Amino acid sequence: MARKNQTLGEFIIENQKDFPYASGELSRLINSIRLAAKMVNHEVNKAGLVDITGAAGETNIQGEDQQKLDVLANETFINTLTNREIVCGIASEENDEFITIKGQKNDHRNNYVVLMDPLDGSSNIDVNVSVGTIFSIYRRVTPTGTPVTIEDFLQPGNLQVAAGYIIYGTSTMLVYTTGHGVNGFTLNPALGTYYLSHPNMKFPDDGSIYSVNEGNYIHFPQGIKDYIKYCQEEKEDRPYTSRYIGSLVSDIHRNMIKGGIYLYPSTSKSPNGKLRLLYECNPMAFIAEQAGGKASDGYRRIMDIKPTELHERTPFVCGSKNMVEKVESFMD
Ligand code: AHG
Ligand code: MN
Ligand code: MN
Ligand code: MN
């Protein structure tokens, strides 16, 4: 039972029985994410004071210029997750290949893989706007005792055992699911403790906010163009309100609380859109579904896509159930 103002530590212990494979490993894994998120939060909060804004001078496999905080957040999560005997492999937006973790005895006995977007919305860093972290957790499918393989990472989203995000916003929040609903915890920075502030989060079935980079309108498929025009029509509850932060985490978080839809469609230049299936879309889809919302590529459920590549991209439509279904009805 979720109790308001419970600490995240208490919540993890009290709900451990609901975790799949209730061995305590997943609890420890969530605990290490909670710790890494505190460290990244500290860095993000002082980003304007010390020289950690701006470009790092490197390009990642997606062809994006890495920001210093992208690199710092990546290292913080990798170090925190590696130093505990839980995770056998990590895949990250900022690493071309997955990382193999042998464990302290070099025996590959750890059971979980983590896929992550260590810093989401990096174009927002230099202008003091919210950013986030996204994570997705699976049990390995290859036998314990052998090195992790690409098969352990290329699992469909419907096999996730946990997923979540951290939003470094006006407050810092950790929101996650283990398949038993979605709970949100707010960090009290004075104490360094997260408290359950948003128990059992739910996407309203309908909403009046749409979030899309309309600068790309000309390149969108006809169905998406038609849907955007629908949002702008003068009817009972329309036109809808347009809100786009440019950080998937922040846009989805707002829409989950207020009711709305987020779209990153295919474009004529990028037929698969921009967002990465494994560490952006799948975890957000798991959260959305657990909160009563929906996530689709316009035609099919995101979590049923069988991935073929680590950094695979997919068009993404996610949010209030009736709004996502409306978009699907516009697609041919
Ligand atoms: P990241 O900063 O992790 O590379 O992700 C950025 C993503 C996502 O967070 C955001 O919604 C989207 O890119 C914004 O893209 P546009 O600037 O093309 O709208
Ligand atoms: Mn990036
Ligand atoms: Mn991202
Ligand atoms: Mn990122």
Image (cartoon, helix red, strand yellow):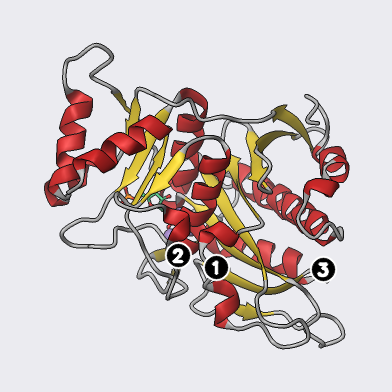
- Residue found at x 60% / y 83%: 149
Q: Earlier in the sequence, mark 2 or mark 3?
A: 2
Tag 1 residue: 92
- Give the x, y percent position of residue 281: 45, 54
Instruction: Determine whether, in the image, residue 202 is placed left or right of residue 258.
Output: right
**Marks 2/1: CA distance?**
13 Å
Give the mark nearest the N terminus, 2 or 1.
2
Q: Is residue 117 above or below residue 295?
A: below
Q: Which residue is mark 3?
A: 84
306 or 279: which is nearer to us? Answer: 306
Indicate the amino acid at tag 3: Arg
Q: Are marks 1 and 3 in contact (CB under 8 Å)?
A: no
Q: Nearer the viewer, residue 78 or 210?
A: 210
Q: Is mark 2 within 8 Å of ligand 2?
A: yes
Amino acid type, callout 1 = Ser
Task: Report the mark closest to the observer, 2 or 3.
Answer: 3
Residue 54 visible in image: no
Residue 66: mark in rendering: 2
Where does the image place residue 7, in percent across and percent down from the top left? 83, 34
Q: Work out whether mark 1 precedes mark 3 in sequence or the reverse, and give the earlier one.
A: 3
Mark pair 1, 3: CA separation: 18 Å
